[in-house]
Amino acid sequence: MRVLVVEDDAGIAVGLGANLRQQGWAVDCVDSVAQAWSALCAEPFDVVLLDLGLRDGDGGEVLRRLRQNTGSRLPAPATPVLIMTARDQVASRIAGLDMGADDYVTKPFDMAELAARMRALRRRAEGRAQPLLRHGPLAIDPAARSVTLDGVPVELSGREFGVLLALLEVSPRVLSRQQIEAKLYSWDSVLGSNAVEVHVHHLRKKLGENTIRTMRGVGYFMAIKDTP
Ligand code: CA
């Protein structure tokens, strides 16, 4: 899952980035309205964390432009946005929510709470109420980052978990290798040309050869569930 952190306080941005990476997010940090807009035009993000007071202007401007975007594919106008404000900025929070923000936290915020709010935003974006994802004999808990197969825990690496989650969230749609890469890797990641293939290979070994199917020349998708 990929998150864009828009924050001009370097201390907060670094701490936030490190914490989110530890939780398995691919994180990109920018510190201005201009950079945030370029990033959103370049890549699909699963969540945006948006500071409102940025060095070149109001973070709300990013939100306004994002929600008003029509036509071109990127930036995706429905991208979930969580605003980060100071405790006394009640008016900005109200304005942000009315401008299309999905949620907010006040600084200083608790990382565990922020993480839970981000998971809730993802669920809502996918139209899913259940915190657990199920697919046939597979059960995936995005909060605990754990997977069971027929009730038995399966050890996955962070990237393997990321590939599985990405495919499950769009199932039964197909994701191309490039789309999976975009969800897994931030700009500064070093990426082998066959990284996704390797993760899929390992996932098939651990979860069953037919769990993830290949649509030749297009990408990967979750096999149709066996159970009703
Ligand atoms: Ca700021």
Image (cartoon, rainbow, N blue to C red):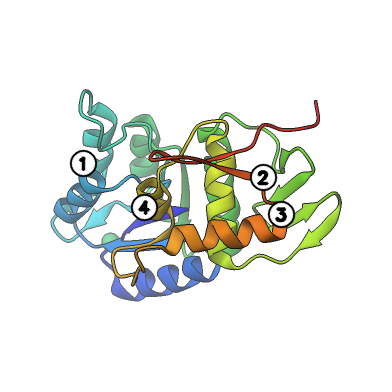
**Mark 1 or 4, nearer chain start:** 1
Q: Position of residue 171 (x, y in %)?
A: 57, 34
Q: CA distance from mark 1 to mark 4?
A: 25 Å
* Amino acid type at image mark 4: Ala
Asked if residue 50 lies left or right of residue 212, the reply is left
Mark 4, residues whose alpha carbon is within 10 Å: few (<14), some, or many (≥20)?
some
Q: Position of residue 138 (x, y in %)?
A: 75, 46
Which residue is disc 1 drawn over? 61
Which residue is disc 4 drawn over? 182
From the image, state whether disc 3 or disc 2 is nearer to you: 2
Judged from the image, the secondary structure of the residue bearing numbered disc 1 is helix
Ligand 1 visible in quadrant: bottom left
Which residue is disc 2 drawn over? 210
Q: CA distance from mark 3 to mark 2?
A: 8 Å
The relative height of residue 83 versus residue 76 in the rendered view (above or below) is below
- Mark number displayed over residue 207: 3
Asked if residue 222 lies left or right of residue 187, the reply is right
**Mark 4 or 3, nearer chain start:** 4
Judged from the image, the secondary structure of the residue bearing numbered disc 2 is loop
**Mark 4 or 2, nearer chain start:** 4
From the image, state whether disc 3 or disc 1 is nearer to you: 3
From the image, state whether disc 4 or disc 2 is nearer to you: 2
Q: Is mark 4 within 8 Å of ligand 1?
A: no
* Amino acid type at image mark 1: Glu
